[in-house]
Amino acid sequence: MLDVEAPQVGLPAQAAQQAILVDTLTRGYEKIPTVFAGVSLFIGSFLIVNTFTMLVKRRTRETALLRAIGASRRQVSRAVLMEALMVGLAASAAGFLLGLGIAAVLPRVLRGDSALPGGPLVIGPRSVVAAFGVGVGVTVLAAWLPARLAAKTSPMEAMLTAEQPPSAQRFRLRGAVGLVLLALGAGSLGSLGGAKDASEENLRAAMAGCGLFAAGLIVLAPVLAGPVIRLTGRLTGRFGVTGRLARENALRDPRRTAATAATLLISTGLVTGLAVIGHSTGQALDRQAAAGLGADYVVSTRSTTTGIDPAAVRRLAETPGVRAAHAVTDSTLFTGTGVRQISGVDPATVRDTMKLDFVSGSADDLAPGRIAVSATLARESGVTTGGLLNVQTGRAGKPTPYPVVGVYKDNPIARDALGSRGEVAADSFLPGSVQRVLLRTDGPATAALENRLRTAVGNNPLLTVQDRDQLVREAAGTMGGLLNVMYGMLGIGVVISALGIVNTLAMSVAERTREIGALRALGMDRAGVRRMIRLEALTVTGFGTLLGLAGGLVGAWAVGSLANGAMDQYTLALPWGTLLLVCLLSLAVGVLAAAVPARRAAALSPLEAAAHT
């Protein structure tokens, strides 16, 4: 192993470059938690709205009494908002402590074997203010609509014992607004269907279209609840009277059902979209890695601070069964759009080990002072073959304009740019080092040949020896690891959805105490009551899951159409097993969430229920 230290000259510039590199490496990890925190807050807002709406309706008589003795609309509204403020403060404090625990564990999960630096947990005043400000703000804003509902209730209306259903005009208006949002979202996504440019602008347009489409589904959910639940209710109807009662209970208040299902709609939609995109991207990476590698074996370093000993490179070339060994130096490339990677290769032999598909130009023109770039880097930098790209390689003192001799399709083996190995190695932070050795062999990969290659490098644990199949699996594993982190964060949304179902069913059971008592008096046993509540939860959960699957598949198609521009090998592939698992887990969440409300409902006795007011 070659462990070379860079010369001590130019240390401030080198430190600045390393800071840029670290910032680039951590930028994505900063965005991912922020995005999913926003998703969790959005899902949680539905829970808050639903809870306060149900509380306001339960307190109708109490509100009527306050209004009758002189309380103004503003005072009623302010009382609800003050209650939301107190709840928000308590919840924010608990969430902040929980967040500290997650912040202590998450960096270890994300860091793994990457170059991310370690460091102590830093808690600044900005974090505290943001946690409490966002937590309290979201809670109060979510309670604003229920507060208005409470303030609008007049004393005479509140004395009515039966709740008035929403007017048909309001349902028609909701349906019209929902259809408009769906049309806008579908139109925005459809306009990107022919775009093959995965630029940041197009990705933002795709995300905006997905957001409009999801908003349309959420607005339309109360309108869709009736026909969808009546259709799926045929399955629950097979359970007899309890199944039919569960269906009618879910249809009793479509707005409440839709608000409860909306949390699952969002979480299921995101999981579905990520699963489809991840599965499709993983298969594309498999094909891309297989298509871009001409070598039979790759020997590489595990650490970015070390290189391969030149003597080990010679021993690899002399190993029986090895036809050719080509050394590659990997270094950083600082561009105007961020930090990229450049591979230093021998222009005369690069085609023997890398399957390069040039859009324009050729690798034959590679030489000191000239580079070839990937299609993505060319697009982001706005450069074409024959143009100049102002970049800084490794520890070079200042940016230099390099002529671009070719643009090739993205290739994970070739990285973002190709240059002459002598020049890249000279400017590397480890001057003269080698990070990879690409090997061509006389025959197929065998265990015996792999053992000889490992022996040639001294069985060094800091070096990896991989054949083509192992490299392909590693490329897919990178996407799998990122998806696992995202799934874990989306699990927070699923937990919030489960809490929403528990909360809705618990309050619904409290509202229907006398009704449940009447059912018990008419002969329904405790098991029947529990089954009715569980089937109701299953009905609501199934409704949210169906809408989430539809939204997730549409979003995956829209983003996938752009991904096809970055990876020619990308095709939309549905992971049927994962989608089935998502459906089963969503339904299981509903059944488990109904356990406590179902037990509480079954514990009611007819006499106690009759005495309830």
Image (tube, rainbow, N blue to C red):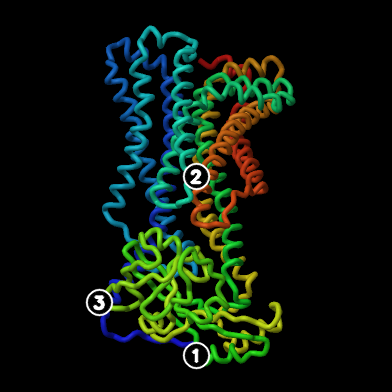
Q: Position of residue 40 (x, y in %)?
A: 44, 43
The residue under label 1 is which amino acid type?
A: Pro
Residue 194 is marked as 2
Q: Secondary structure at mark 2?
A: loop
Residue pointed to by mark 3: 12
Helix, strand or loop under label 1: helix
**How far is the residue under mark 2 from the one under mark 1?**
49 Å
- Taking the image as shown, residue 137 lies to the left or right of residue 345, namely left
Q: Earlier in the sequence, mark 3 or mark 2?
A: 3
Residue 292 appears at what percent x and percent y? 57, 68
Give whichever of 488, 19 is nearer the camera.
19
The mark nearer the N terminus, 2 or 1, is 2
Q: Residue at x 59, y 81 (%)?
A: 439
Report if the CB atoms under discs 3 and 1 are less than 8 Å apart. no
Q: Are marks 2 and 1 in contact (CB under 8 Å)?
A: no
Q: Nearer the viewer, residue 243 or 516?
A: 243
